[in-house]
Image (tube, helix red, strand yellow):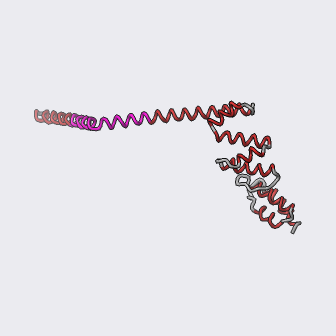
Amino acid sequence: MSIQDDINYVKKELSADEKVLESALKIETLYNKYKFALWGLIGAGIIAFAGNVIATNMADSKLNLANNALLVLQKDASNSQALALLKENNPKLLELYTYSQAVKTKDVTQLKTLNSSQNNIIADISKYHTSILAKSATSSEYYKDISLVERAYNEIKDGKSKEAKEKLEMVDSRSSLASVAQLLNHYTIKGE
């Protein structure tokens, strides 16, 4: 190990230290150049996270208020304060509650107001129940099979067995009403 080896070793060490120092200076230069953008980005991220947490907490709070109001209404349907809370915090849940109450009490006027609901499911099933209470058959997207069976039954009563058969054939074979549809279909044989 000569002095030359020691000098080469020191040169390598100094070269490595220079590279580290050079990298640090480059990072410092980049930081000074973009520090406002960097801190702005960090600040925007913190604000977005905080806003998301606040929005989630507010939504959860509204949901809890609506659920509690529904529980109160299930015990006491005449509680106007709970009804107002439900209307304010979750109008869709209010429509569902109104529908269930209207079906339970057979309130045709309330069901007719729900026929024009923005919620397609509520509108469809309220139209269906309105027609059931009026003792007439109607088509329904959500009560499709039972609606077909009812209309076929009415057509059998009217002596229109061919139309009844067509409707009964549209009942899904996997439906729980398939056996009823088959029975009615056999009943139409007599009418031909």
Q: Is residue 157 magenta?
A: no
**Side of 91 relative to 110 (left or right):** left
Residue 38 falls inside the magenta stretch: yes
Judge whether 97 appears above or below 151 on screen: above
Q: Quadrant of the C terminus?
A: bottom right
> Quarter of the image containing the N terminus?
top left
The residue depicted at 60 percent of the width and 33 percent of the height is: 62
Q: Is residue 157 above or below residue 15?
A: below
Q: Residue at x 10, y 32 (%)?
A: 3
Q: Which residue appears farthest toward the right when viewing the image? A: 190
Asked if residue 178 lies left or right of residue 21, the reply is: right
The image position of residue 170, as x and y in percent, is 74, 61
Q: Measured from the top left, where is residue 149 in percent x and y?
A: 79, 57
The main secondary structure of the magenta stretch is helix
Count up the numbered dots: 0
Residue 143 as seen in the image, left or right of residue 21: right
Q: Which residue is pictured at 39% across the width and 34% down the height?
A: 43
- Could you tell me residue 28's position as x and y percent? 25, 34
- The range drawn in magenta is 19-47
